[in-house]
Amino acid sequence: MTPHVAEVEHRRERAVRLALAGHPYDHIATELGYASRSGAWKAVSRALRGRTSDAVDEYRSMEIARLEALNTIYYPKAMKGDRHAAEMCLKVISAEVKLLGLDTPNTSDERVESIVISAEQPIRDLKKLLGAEDEPD
């Protein structure tokens, strides 16, 4: 027998709240009865994709703040030619894109107002520093 949808959503929300509180996925799995840390991670990921609760928005905001703190440290170094810092910046940007769901095409027919922030130029600058410039069109 499969669990009721509301029960699954409630469990995912609890997983997000535990992650927000800083608990590792091993603890979340044990606490909520997931078979492994992977199951707990998947629950949090699905909740993030589904944006099912205020806890999801709070968790996403906290993670974005952490990523921005890292970018604040590494970006100036990357712009001065530090290859490791440039690689870290690209990883941070990639993580932000995934966290914000910008890597997933929107298949919804709903129209949503949004603010578009382009990371195109900083990415090009970082790739240039790494010697991986984009090919011309």
Image: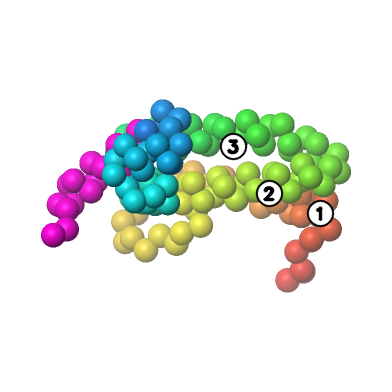
Task: Mark 2: give few (<14), some (14-19) or many (20+) Cα within 10 Å.
Answer: some
Establish if 130 lies above or below 28: below
Tell me which label, 3 or 2, sits earlier in the chain: 3
Is 6 a magenta residue? Answer: yes
Q: Which residue is mark 3?
A: 67
Closer to us: 28 or 87: 28
Look at 53% across and 36% down and name the residue there: 64
The picture places residue 8, in percent across and down from the top left corner, at 23, 48
Establish if 14 lies above or below 104: above
Q: Which residue is mark 2?
A: 90
Is 54 a magenta residue? Answer: no
Query: Which three-letter amino acid code belongs to the residue tagged 3?
Result: Leu
Tell me which label, 1 or 2, sits earlier in the chain: 2
Most distant residue in the bottom direction: 137
Q: Secondary structure at mark 3?
A: helix
Look at 66% across and 52% down and name the residue there: 120
Q: What's the mark number on residue 130?
A: 1
Q: CA distance from mark 3 to mark 2?
A: 11 Å
Q: Secondary structure at mark 2?
A: helix
Q: CA distance from mark 1 to mark 2?
A: 10 Å
Residues rendered magenta in the picture: 1-17
